[in-house]
Amino acid sequence: MHEKSAQTGQTAGLLFLREDELRLAQDMIFFANRDLVATADAMLAEMGFGRAHHRTLHFIGRNPGLPVGELLHILGIAKQSLARVLGPLIREGYVKQTPGRTDRRQRLLSLTPEGVALERRLFETQHERLTMAFREAGGPAVEGFRKVLRGMMKDDARAWLDRAEAARASKR
């Protein structure tokens, strides 16, 4: 199968594996991420929060009852770093902690109604951009995009996503 170059629209064959094409992909990832998070970043900054708070709200919102240890693993940060992010979110009423059902030492995280509303507002800032890009690209390209993103992830991230999606599917 041949791929089309992002610059020319011409078929590139395996040329997408050349360094200049990989660097172009890297550039595109940087710019896409910058533009995707810009509005959410500004909204969070007004509240004294940053991207780490956004990631935390996102994963807790997508996985209510998320154990703290699992959040640490997902975010790839130290306990001390998570405490600096989670503390304000709990104090300001966006996240709540409850003890585990079987292990009372375990702390399970969920969003409060205020946290759900904030996470929703943050998602809405990105929803339109993602929808527009996916519509413009079309179904096969979106599937290819997902395969590329998955290919960039480490095995543990892929496994986590598979488990999370299976859990969500079983609740539908």
Image (cartoon, rainbow, N blue to C red):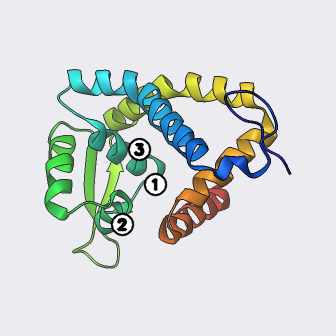
Tell me the CA gap for discs 3 and 2.
Answer: 14 Å
At x 46%, y 54%, the residue is 63
Q: Is residue 27 above or below residue 45?
A: below
Q: Is residue 164 left or right of residue 37?
A: right
- Which residue bears the numbered disc 2? 70
- Which residue bears the numbered disc 3? 58
Q: Does label 3 or label 1 sit earlier along the sequence? A: 3
Q: Residue 150: image x %, image y %?
A: 60, 57
Q: Residue 66: image x %, image y %?
A: 38, 60
At x 55%, y 61%, the residue is 161
Q: How many marks?
A: 3
Q: Residue 89: image x %, image y %?
A: 21, 42
Q: Secondary structure at mark 1?
A: loop
Q: Secondary structure at mark 3?
A: helix
Q: Residue 102: image x %, image y %?
A: 34, 78
Label 1–label 2 contact, CB within 8 A: yes
What kind of residue is marked 3?
His
| Quadrant in the picture for residue 64 | bottom left
- Which residue bears the numbered disc 1? 63
Give the crowd class for mark 1: few <14, some 14-19, many >=20 residues within 10 Å.
some
Q: Is residue 63 left or right of residue 108?
A: right
Tell me the CA gap for discs 3 and 1.
Answer: 9 Å
Q: In front of the other: label 3 or label 1? A: 3
